Image: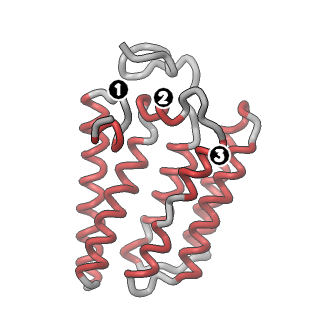
Amino acid sequence: MTLIDRLIAPQATRAEVCLGFGAAIGGAATGFVLAMSAGWSWLAVLVVAVIAFDMFGGAVVNAMASAKRWYHRPGRTWVHHLGFVGVHVQPFILAAVVPGFGWIDAAAIYAVALGGAVIVTVAPEALRRPIAFAATAFGLVAVTSMVTVPHELMWFAPVLLIKLLLAHLLPEQAGRPDLHGSPAGAAAA
């Protein structure tokens, strides 16, 4: 498996690769500038930039047809999907290095993401998409109105929820063409 296969998805198109890396690099630059403006340590700035690369890039990549085919291929279960969400411990990494990003806030953000993922994965398949949007909408209210993080990181929790609950957990809708023009879920030529 190549690096592109790991970072984007197997059989990603050139357009998907460009879009994924473009969003990731743009996110990293945004995170870097915001962290620098806060006057944080170089370690905090570097961590924020790397996490922003992953969050922004992941939000876009996980919504792509090639990633949908990969993450929702035969044999993948709710355990795989919750595991993917569970390994996203970035809130705790931020709490460890960013001044003003508290451990309780990190735990709350993590709990909202993981709780939303559980709700989405146990939902009946026919209702999974609207339930994912509901979980994300209510999760956004929780993380933006009840959690206090530095102003420069107010983007983090919303992008995390979009990446995980909307982009990753939702399979491609049947019958929608991918970038190859074939129905979603069909093998790419």
Task: Point out the frontmost of discs 1 and 3.
Answer: 3
Image spot of residue 40 (x, y percent): 28, 84
* Mark earlier in primary sequence (2, 1): 1
Image spot of residue 124 (x, y percent): 76, 36
Image spot of residue 146 (x, y percent): 61, 76
Q: Say which quadrant the N terminus sits in.
A: top left
Amino acid type, residue under disc 3 in the picture:
Val
* Mark earlier in primary sequence (3, 2): 2
Residue lying at 36% horizontally and 56% vertically, measured from the top left: 54
Query: In the figure, 153 relative to 188: above or below?
Result: below
Residue lying at 56% horizontally and 54% vertically, measured from the top left: 85
- Residue 79 is labelled as 3
Q: Tag 1's secondary structure?
A: loop
Q: Tag 2's secondary structure?
A: helix
Amino acid type, residue under disc 2 in the picture:
Arg
Relative to residue 81, is residue 54 drawn left or right?
left
* Mark earlier in primary sequence (1, 3): 1
Query: In the figure, 12 relative to 117: above or below?
Result: above
Amino acid type, residue under disc 1 in the picture:
Gln
Q: Say which quadrant the C terminus sits in.
A: top left
Q: Tag 3's secondary structure?
A: helix
Categorize mark 1 by other alpha carbons within 10 Å: few (<14), some (14-19), many (20+). some
Task: Point out the frontmost of discs 3 and 2.
Answer: 3
Relative to residue 156, is residue 50 drawn left or right?
left
Residue under pointer 2: 69
| Mark 2 and mark 1: Cα distance apart in space | 9 Å
| Mark 3 and mark 2: Cα distance apart in space | 17 Å
Residue nearest the viewer, comparing 148 with 185? 185
Residue nearest the viewer, comparing 56 with 187? 187
- Tag 2 near tag 1, CB within 8 Å: yes
Residue under pointer 1: 11
